[in-house]
Image (tube, rainbow, N blue to C red):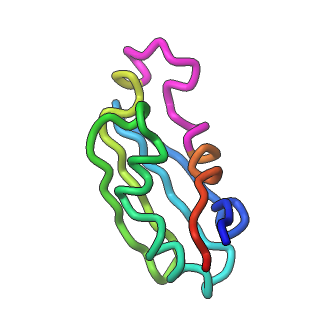
Amino acid sequence: MKRKLYELAHARAGDKGNTTILSLIAYRAEDFPLLRERVTPEAVKRHFAGIIKGEVKRHELPHLGALQFVGEDALGGGVTTSLGVDAHGKSLSSALLEMEIETD
């Protein structure tokens, strides 16, 4: 069975220059292991193909039930140089929640 991440978690976004920072926070502690297993840096990179052009790194915050993803070369040069409507990348947190994972 596949589920969208918004069924299991909420997300926040931030940015620093041309780097997007996306946090995925489980609603329930018991769902965190599934998120940790299925929402890998590689899966996030595939989900944002054409948007995140650089490396995706993941940091785990198990006591918060959260995963943080840092995506490089993702914001068209950053706020001061991008012509993008969302140069801060805030909408990318909503886009992350549209990702589907297999839940067995």
Q: Residue at x 45, y 74 (%)?
A: 36
Q: Main secondary structure of the magenta part?
A: loop
Q: Residue at x 32, y 50 (%)?
A: 56
Camera-side residue: 13 or 52? Answer: 52
Q: Left or right: where does residue 101 sit relative to residue 83?
A: right
Q: Is residue 31 above or below residue 21?
A: below
Q: Residue furthest left?
A: 55
Q: Residue at x 67, y 60 (%)?
A: 4
Q: Is residue 7 above or below residue 31?
A: above
Q: Position of residue 25 (x, y in %)?
A: 58, 67
Q: Left or right: where does residue 29 sit relative to residue 89?
A: right
Q: Position of residue 5 (x, y in %)?
A: 63, 61
Q: Residue at x 72, y 65 (%)?
A: 7
Camera-side residue: 2 or 68? Answer: 2
Q: Which residues are magenta?
A: 79-92
Quarter placement of the N terminus? bottom right
Q: Is residue 45 above or below residue 40?
A: above
Q: Left or right: where does residue 44 sit relative to residue 100?
A: left
Camera-side residue: 37 or 104? Answer: 104
Q: Position of residue 63 (x, y in %)?
A: 48, 83
Quarter placement of the C terminus? bottom right
Question: Is residue 80 magenta-colored?
Answer: yes
Q: Is residue 22 above or below residue 48?
A: below
Question: Is residue 56 magenta-colored?
Answer: no
